[in-house]
Image: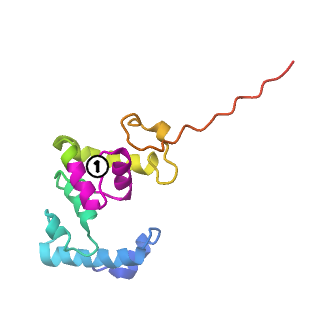
Amino acid sequence: MVELGEEEVGKLIRTIGLWRNKAKNVVELSRQLVEDHHGEVPGTREELEKLAGVGRKTANVVLNVAFHKPTVPVDTHVFRLANRSGLGRGKTVEAVEKALEARIPLEMIQPSHHWMILQGRYVCKARKPECWRCNAKNPCLFPDKTPAPRVKAPKTLAG
């Protein structure tokens, strides 16, 4: 990646948002991994967050997925789902993360991370949550549950 440089990496990732900044970070992160970590991805949040473009959420994803550590990466979808449902309420990402880690059984933290992202992205949507599709709608604390859309009855022929 370092040899490719920002311009070539940018061409490869141009279809994603903020691609210029991400290309710059990918090149710098790659340089840091080679020079500071002998080409290995560090296995602690502290070391991961020192890498270019890596914040708490990305560090937690790497720890959860690559190192099988019980972390809960909280993105916008997980934050919304946790607060709406009551599963892990908090005003900050860190507060929600701590609440979820305290509530989710240790052996379920890894698989629950992906479930919460998908649930928040496709069912517990920001503007129009599809509550009727949710498997956890009964224990959910969200007061403004969205009803299922009405299905129009088929027209009948008189005759």
Is residue 10 in view?
yes
Which part of the image, by quadrant, shows the C terminus?
top right
Q: To which quarter of the image does residue 136 belong?
A: top left
Whole-percent x, y for residue 33 in the image: 18, 73
| Amino acid at circle 1 | Gly
Q: Residues within 10 Å of mark 1 (few under 14, many from 20)?
A: many
Whole-percent x, y for residue 76 in the image: 37, 58
Q: Nearer the viewer, residue 120 or 103?
A: 103
The residue at the point 31 percent across, 59 percent down is 91
The residue at the point 33 percent across, 79 percent down is 24
Q: Nearer the viewer, residue 8 or 138?
A: 138
Q: Is residue 113 magenta?
A: no
Q: Nearer the viewer, residue 37 or 18?
A: 18
State the residue lying farthest toward the top.
159
Q: Is residue 100 magenta?
A: yes
Is residue 40 in view?
no
Q: Nearer the viewer, residue 117 or 1?
A: 117
Q: Is residue 2 left or right of residue 149?
A: left
Whole-percent x, y for residue 107 in the image: 18, 41
Q: Is residue 83 left or right of residue 154?
A: left
How many numbered callouts?
A: 1
The residue indicated by pointer 1 is 88
Whole-percent x, y for residue 65 in the image: 23, 53
State the residue lying farthest toward the right.
159
Above or below residue 107? Residue 40 is: below
- Predominant secondary structure, magenta span: helix
State which region is magenta.
Answer: 74-101
Q: Is residue 69 left or right of residue 17?
A: left
The residue at the point 20 percent across, 49 percent down is 101
Q: Is residue 116 left or right of residue 143?
A: left
